[in-house]
Image (tube, helix red, strand yellow):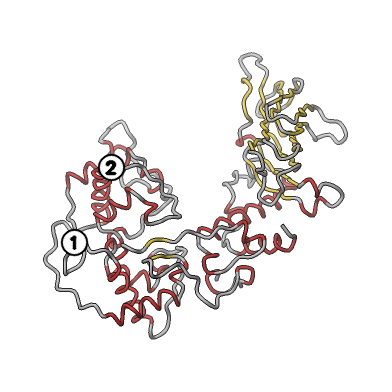
Amino acid sequence: MSATGSSNLIGIVVLCTSLSATAVARAADGDGSLPGWAVSSVSAKDRGAKSRLNKVVTLSETAAFTLAPGESIDPTIEAAGFHATFTTDLHVARRGKYRFTIVGGGGIGSVSDRDSPGTARFSTGFSTNLPGDLSGSTEWVAFEPGSVRVVVSFERNGDAQARLRLDWEMQGENGAGFAREPIPSTVTTVPKEMREPVDLSLAERRGRVLLTELGCVNCHAASGAAATLVERRPPIALERVALRARREWLARWIADPQACNPGVGMPALLAGDGAPQDVASLVELFESLAPAPAPASATGPTEIAVDPSLAERGRTLFHEYGCVVCHGPFESPQAAYAEPAFPNEMPSAPPLVPFGDLKEKWRIDELAAFLRDPKAVRTHGRMPDLALSEPDALAIAHYLATKFGAPAAAPAAAPAAAPVDPARIEAGKALFNRVGCAACHTVSAEIPPLAPAGVKPLESLDPSRGCLA
């Protein structure tokens, strides 16, 4: 990796996140401290007088790792022969004697206390070329309540399998003490003098994730280091979008995605006096390409009325399958499980993943199909396949419909659909490619994924304009 490519990537990933470094990091303690260890890593060739220029500093919850052959501790550091240093201020809550044990293989590891320059209060380590674990334990060291600097170093031998872990224990006296265990992140703090580079690395890391999650490189070509570190987001399938979403919602979403879901990654691509006609052309394109519903209906997809008995079963399944963990509850545990001993309060924290407008975006049968196979629609999505049976998925879809709204009974016959205009369909296909829809979506084999012409490459983006603005 060239130094130029690396610096370009750093600039891109930092400007592509609108959150501050501390906001994207794990939540800091009330005093502003950041739990964990600062990790400084350098490649074998960069160790020496100028190693500071190419050092990577980031955050780790623990002083531990397991690396497969050829795998590196950081994607920008070469795997063979790297050197890593984990540094933390360890918070000792109780007076007593403590001992540290460092375990690992595939290199040279050590742990020491650097509070007193020149003389460490404790030190031990291991040295082995073998992947199998060796260990070293310090003497018992007396600590008063307070903070102590702990430094763990590891130098890899070659690029074979490597492991590292730091444990500690407290000598039992008068009922105190605990057995050997890994040091929890709750008692470690990133040193203040290392906080700035750690915060910067967290912002870079978050920016790198966003570059893929938001599909930036689908439109803006990446080069150099960015091309090897940032993946192109798989396209979202729209083949059935006209079956699962209502026409009115599709039109609103295409015209102004941010108004429908503030903060969504999709930008508004249509503007000017011709925008309403362009929206209509895309909606007709989606309707023409969607598979015909069964049984085929001249009036479009058939609405399914909510079945109260299915919805009641779905209410139970929504909690049993764990949907509530990410999407949040609609009712208290007491109400959801009909158990008087459970809490009757709703959680104050907002859900991690809000549902959005399910009423207009999803028909019940299509929502059930999505729940059974989320990756069929959102190939890049985080929602896991929960191996739902068809009846269970349908029950959960009916339950969600009771919360967001759906027809209470089968709807009356709708008026006949307007005749399909081939010219409008062709206009929709041309527009789909021209404005960039095809960079992030697929609708049929005849419209392959295609980045729009004339867009700037990733390293030339201006944070004050376009999507970044």
Q: Is mark 1 on a helix, strand or loop?
A: loop
Chain-order first, disc 1 or disc 2: 1
Amino acid beneath label 1 = Thr
Judge from the rendering whether residue 172 lies leftward or rightward of residue 121; answer left or right: left
Residue identified by numbered label 1: 302
Residue toward you, 401 or 194: 401
Identified at 60% across, 58% down, the residue is 20
Identified at 72% across, 46% down, the residue is 192
Identified at 75% across, 32% down, the residue is 109
> Residue 220: x percent and y percent?
56, 69
Identified at 38% across, 70% down, the residue is 446
Quarter of the image that includes the N terminus? bottom right
* Mark 1 in CB contact with mark 2 (< 8 angstroms): no
Instruction: Using the image, tell me which numbered label, if any, was put on residue 389.
Output: 2
Amino acid beneath label 2 = Ser
> Residue 307: x percent and y percent?
17, 49
